[in-house]
Image: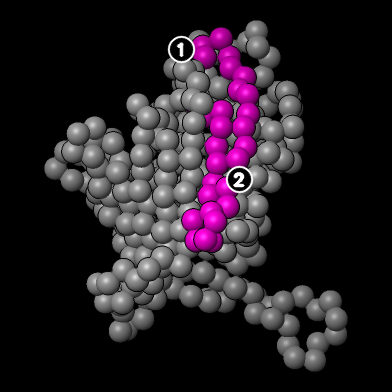
Amino acid sequence: MKRLFYFILLIAGFSSIHSCKDLTDEEGNPLLDLNDNTGLNGPRALSREVTDFGLIAQYQYNGLLLSNVITEKASLTNVEWSGDKISKITFKGFLDLDNDGTIDTDSVSYTQQYTYGNLGKLTLISENRTIFRRTPPPVGSPPGTPPGPYAVFAKTKSMYNLTYSSTTAKLASIVMKRGNDVTSFAYTDYTKATYSYLGDNVSSVTKEVGKLTGTVFEPAIQNYKFDFSSYDSQISGYTLLPFEYKVSVLISTDINDDRSLMLSPNSPKRASATDMIPPVPVTVVVSTNYRYDPQTYMTQGFGINYFYKPL
């Protein structure tokens, strides 16, 4: 339920924002502002996602290739390439691991290795993750005593298997298995995401979260459905990001599937999230109108401002 409340607060709350401030990229070049009469001609890259509350993401490039992404609380994602394919992604920073709508104070570090199948499609991601938690103040400390330094709280290993539709070649599912990184390693947890489409756009995503007993997937402890509809015919700025990076965003936490609109070439004007566990499922619905530049790239939607830079 907390995730559903966060979903409506994040999207509906941002929908009232209409900042039109001019920005520059990391090299000082002017970005596309939000004036309907301006725009970029020729190749472009997505540079920033911002609201009046602050930076959501800043994208940095090495030539034409995405190299780094800076997100909330100065978190840093590093993207490594092997030829024209992403081979490794590393992250150091802070995430909303418990999906309560607030970035955690625990620090997270992970490395993801990417494996591709015979057709060049991403099929397997292996991840090693460490969570750091600040030690509490010593017993008997005066009120207001700050916590101690960060120390390792948990280490896990995860495996993500990606499958694709045999008819459309689109992403069909991501199944994750995870276990604590200990001597007697065993997978103990799972998530399953299943994707449906309307044309080229993601129309719905179901997410199950549960426990593994050996090779048996126990009944889901959490079960959500995210729907996206009323797509426009313009260009989503997320089409400028690599598919593998977008997958990395989706799997950064157990439930980040409201971001699945990143996989679509167009932008949905309506989105909903449903908690499927209660006897009567609970649904939250939000909607938006988009703004576009003359080249039909979105510049604002759900209150998020999108800025671009020339390539």
Q: Quadrant of residue 106?
A: bottom right
Residue with the mark numbered 1: 42
Q: Position of residue 62 (x, y in %)?
A: 43, 34
Q: Is residue 66 visible?
A: no
Q: Nearer the viewer, residue 52 or 170?
A: 170
Residue 258: x and y in percent read 52, 45
Does 18 sit left or right of 133 as displayed? right
Relative placement, left or right, of 219 versus 1 is: left
In the image, is residue 9 above or below residue 291? below
Q: What residue is at 68 percent from the left and 14 percent from the top? A: 35
Q: Residues within 10 Å of mark 1 (few under 14, many from 20)?
A: few
Find residue 284 and name its label: 2
Instruction: Say which label, 1 or 2, has the lower sequence index.
Output: 1
Q: Of residues 185 and 17, which is closer to you in this image?
A: 17
| Quarter the N terminus occupies | bottom right
- State which region is magenta: 267-296
> Which residue: 73% across, 27% down?
18
* Amino acid identity at mark 2: Val
Q: CA distance from mark 1 to mark 2?
A: 39 Å
**Does 88 appear above or below 12?**
below
